[in-house]
Amino acid sequence: MAKQPESRLVGKILNFLNANYPGWWRKIHGGPFQSRGIPDIIGCHRGRFISIEVKEPGNTASGLQKKNGNEIRKAKGLWLVAYSVEDVKNMMEAKFK
């Protein structure tokens, strides 16, 4: 089965993060025993928790995803809805360079 566009984008983002921002990065795979609304990618770089919800252009984060994102930000973590590797690059450069 071919990968969906969002899955391909997740892979590209993970490759970018691993190549440019050493740390701990993981793709979160949804399943029946996982809480809903968890971001697609979570990680830690320089002691900072980072989470990324990956969307295809034209799609938006769900209400539950936004709620979780707001809770992550309230806890001083970073949360981003990314439509491209460039979105992630811009956030990471703004926060860590």
Image (tube, rainbow, N blue to C red):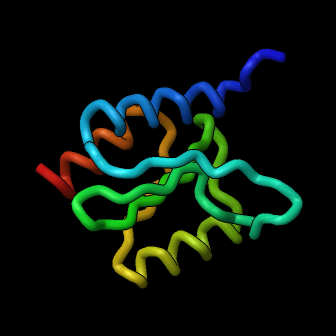
Camera-side residue: 34 or 78? 34
84 lies left or right of 4: left
Camera-side residue: 70 or 19? 19
52 lies left or right of 24: right
**Number of disc labels:** 0
Q: Residue furthest left?
A: 97
On the image, the x and y values in percent for residue 84 come to 46, 33
Camera-side residue: 43 or 97? 43
| Location of residue 89 by image quarter | top left
On the image, the x and y values in percent for residue 59 come to 66, 44
44 lies left or right of 72: left
Q: Residue furthest right?
A: 32
| Location of residue 65 by image quarter | bottom right
For residue 96, above or below residue 17: below
Instruction: Name the residue at 35% across, 38% down.
Output: 17
For residue 46, above or below residue 15: below
Instruction: Name the residue at 62% across, 36% down.
Output: 56
68 lies left or right of 19: right
Pick the quarter of the image with the N terminus: top right
On the image, the x and y values in percent for residue 77 come to 38, 72
On the image, the x and y values in percent for residue 24 come to 39, 51
For residue 33, above or below residue 67: above
Instruction: Name the residue at 60% across, 42% down.
Output: 55
Instruction: Name the residue at 30% across, 66% down.
Output: 48
